[in-house]
Image (tube, rainbow, N blue to C red):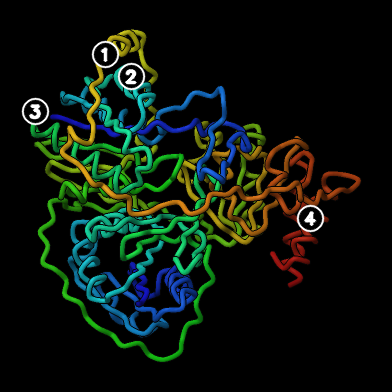
């Protein structure tokens, strides 16, 4: 079995609010300084799912990212956790990539991997990224490849050459069987990602990570479909009306009356 | 020019967000059509206050599979000639809308909280970076495809002229994926988290799972859904399905009560759209107070029982 896991490098979301600066003039968010970017949380869950399949059934796991040279750090982490190899799609023309461009480039990279080696059985992706929070790229990749997708998934088993998946629904889950190739968008319910063992960290340090340009992928003239016309911060002021009373219990009662006045109860 | 709203129907009632989608579509000022999709749902069509209802009704459409729905919806979008297509931001449409968009050669904007026009162009606003920033997107290709956050748009009034109902062909599908079982979670006592008008959430400040009943009792008195911060679900006090936040459910209730929650990015991403937020926390410097309309600095073990009892009194007296 051959599995590709897509991983995105994102600013660390576990920082205090307000540490992100919004640069409206350049329409970008400036991540906090001194805090290293991390592997997107759901992508780490997807990688964990791939590594569990590898342990149970044998598989080759390839980590795939798209981004600037610094994104090699998340690919090294993927190798440290247990991925067998990694590829970075890197091109100056991708600096302004939107979901359309990103999905096209990743789909082309997956096609290239399949053409040059064993066929790809599974693509596992995190259900969404914590920066732009769109959850769109994996499904675009599946559509461009002409593959089925299942999203979001909370459990993946493999039996008789098929994936057996728990796909989450609004009121529970469906058990779905699907023959490869298929793309699965993974949710955190699948389990906590492992911590890289020391041996893995040493292997990651020596790993060669090739970078593929758009020309390597046979792509040109990829035009974004959407653009940010305005980026702004929601103004948050210290506006809470603090309910004060002699005791905390009294404050609770006064609060109830205020909620009634505001017709909220 | 027209706007098409996609209604994922099941059962005998319109889904909660259907009229919100119609309301958002009407605000764009072009004729509004609907695409009603499901199995045995055709009878719902006249209840949609729109110009035309396209109906895709077939047994093959349930249980849902993207492989079956995508060609149907993409064909219907082309048939309707809509230049804007609005989906609900449900688990189902989070998969379906991007697939339909890519099949049509366009891109989607997901989880939108506002629609507007600037320089004659449709702009779609959505929170990014866990709600630290809002981005207004414009889409250069057509149609524009978007999913709309639940409870972020005012619902259209039902009624009015009866819409024209048009059956659309359901393409013959032979999906590779097969749903072999459907498991429904045990129904919870209160309303579902994402659709609830009132939510009470607890955080690490509660101290331990043995104190969770304080949150549940307040929620019961308010008729609220119960939520939790990631710290609490990670610690296993309550199931992950209760998590409100970046990696959990996004809620936009009329009233959100945060108990013992500090208000990290992770959490505010899930509840920042609440219309009224109440914070109860011992730490006067907790970030949550910056988002709150009302706050109490104090020990929840004293505040909550008194608050709960007074709410019961007020509700009892009508």
Task: Residue at 37% x, 47% y: name it.
Answer: A135
Badge 1: residue crowd in 10 Å (few <14, some 14–19, many ≥20): some
**Are marks 2 and 1 in one subunit?**
yes
> Which is more foreground, mark 4 or mark 1?
1
The label number, if any, that marks residue A255 in the structure image: 4
**SS under mark 2:** helix
Look at the picture and state if B83 lies above or below B199.
Answer: below
| Residue at mark 3 | A117
Is the residue under label 1 in contact with that under label 3 (CB below 8 Å)? no
State the residue in front, B81 or B156: B81
Of mark 2 and mark 4, the one earlier in the sequence is: 2
- List the residue tagged with mark 1: A207
Kindly identify the residue that appears in the image at 23 percent across and 71 percent down. B78
Q: Give the image location of residue B186, x and y in percent.
A: 41, 53
Protein chain holding label 1: A
Pick whichever of labels 2 and 3 is earlier in the sequence.
2
Between B276 and B141, which is closer to the camera in this rendering? B141
Judge whether A204 appears above or below B44 on screen.
Answer: above
Image position, residue B232 (x, y; %): 55, 36
- Mark 4 chain: A
Q: Are marks 4 and 3 on the same chain?
A: yes
Q: Position of residue B208 (x, y in %)?
A: 62, 32
| Disc 3: host chain | A
Q: Residue at x 32, y 8 (%)?
A: A202
Cα–Cα gap, marks 4 and 3 = 65 Å
Looking at the image, residue A198 lies above or below residue B32: above
Secondary structure beneath label 4: helix
Residue picked out by circle 2: A76
Separation of residues labelled 3 and 1 (CA atoms): 19 Å
Label 4 vs 3, first from the N-terminus: 3
| Pointer 2 chain | A
């Amino acid at each position: 079995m051959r599995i590709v896991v897509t991983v995105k490098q994102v600013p660390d979301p576990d920082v205090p609010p307000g540490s992100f600066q919004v640069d409206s003039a350049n329409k970008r968010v400036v991540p906090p300084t001194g805090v290293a970017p991390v592997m997107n949380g759901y992508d780490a869950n997807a990688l964990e799912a791939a590594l569990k399949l590898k342990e149970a059934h044998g598989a080759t796991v390839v980590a795939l990212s798209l981004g600037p040279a610094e994104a090699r750090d998340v690919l090294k982490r993927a190798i440290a956790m247990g991925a067998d190899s990694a590829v970075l799609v890197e091109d100056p023309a991708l600096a302004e990539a939107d979901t359309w461009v990103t999905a096209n480039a990743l789909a082309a990279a997956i096609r290239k991997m399949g053409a040059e080696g064993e066929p790809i059985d599974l693509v596992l992706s995190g259900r969404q990224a914590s920066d732009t929070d769109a959850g769109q790229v994996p499904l675009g990749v599946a559509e461009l490849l002409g593959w089925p997708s299942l999203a979001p998934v909370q459990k993946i088993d493999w039996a008789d050459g098929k994936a057996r998946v728990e796909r989450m629904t609004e009121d529970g889950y469906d058990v779905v069987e699907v023959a490869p190739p298929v793309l699965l968008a993974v949710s955190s319910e699948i389990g906590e990602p492992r911590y890289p063992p020391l041996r893995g960290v040493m292997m990651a340090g020596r790993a060669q990570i090739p970078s593929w340009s758009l020309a390597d992928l046979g792509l040109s003239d990829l035009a974004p479909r959407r653009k940010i016309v305005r980026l702004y911060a929601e103004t948050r002021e210290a506006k809470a009306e603090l309910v004060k009373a002699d005791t905390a219990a009294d404050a609770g009662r006064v609060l109830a009356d205020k909620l009634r006045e505001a017709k909220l109860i | 020019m027209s706007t098409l709203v996609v209604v994922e129907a099941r059962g005998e009632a319109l889904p909660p967000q259907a009229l919100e989608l119609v309301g958002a579509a009407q605000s764009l000022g072009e004729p509004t059509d609907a695409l009603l999709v499901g199995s045995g749902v055709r009878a719902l069509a006249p209840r949609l206050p729109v110009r035309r209802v396209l109906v895709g009704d077939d047994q093959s459409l349930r249980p849902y599979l993207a492989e079956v729905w995508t060609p149907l919806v993409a064909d219907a979008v082309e048939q309707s000639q809509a230049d804007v297509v609005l989906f609900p931001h449900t688990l189902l449409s989070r998969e379906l809308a991007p697939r339909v968009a890519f099949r049509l050669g366009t891109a989607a904007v997901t989880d939108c909280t506002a629609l507007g026009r600037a320089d004659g162009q449709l702009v779609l606003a959505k929170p990014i970076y866990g709600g630290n920033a809002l981005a207004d997107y414009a889409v250069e290709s057509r149609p524009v495809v978007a999913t709309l956050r639940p409870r972020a748009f005012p619902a259209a009034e039902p009624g009015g002229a009866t819409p024209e109902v048009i059956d659309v062909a359901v393409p013959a599908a032979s999906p590779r994926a097969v749903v072999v079982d459907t498991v429904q979670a045990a129904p919870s006592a209160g309303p579902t988290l994402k659709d609830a008008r009132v939510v009470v959430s607890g955080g690490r400040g509660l101290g331990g799972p043995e104190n969770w009943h304080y949150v549940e009792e307040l929620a019961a008195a308010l008729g609220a859904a119960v939520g939790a911060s990631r710290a609490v679900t990670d610690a296993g006090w309550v199931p992950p399905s209760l998590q409100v936040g970046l990696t959990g459910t996004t809620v936009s209730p009329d009233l959100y009560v945060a108990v013992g929650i500090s208000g990290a990015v992770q959490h505010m991403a899930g509840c920042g759209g609440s219309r009224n937020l109440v914070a109860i926390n011992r730490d006067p410097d907790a970030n949550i107070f910056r988002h709150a309309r009302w706050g109490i600095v104090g020990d929840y073990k004293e505040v909550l029982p008194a608050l709960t009892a007074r709410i019961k009194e007020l509700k009892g007296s009508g």
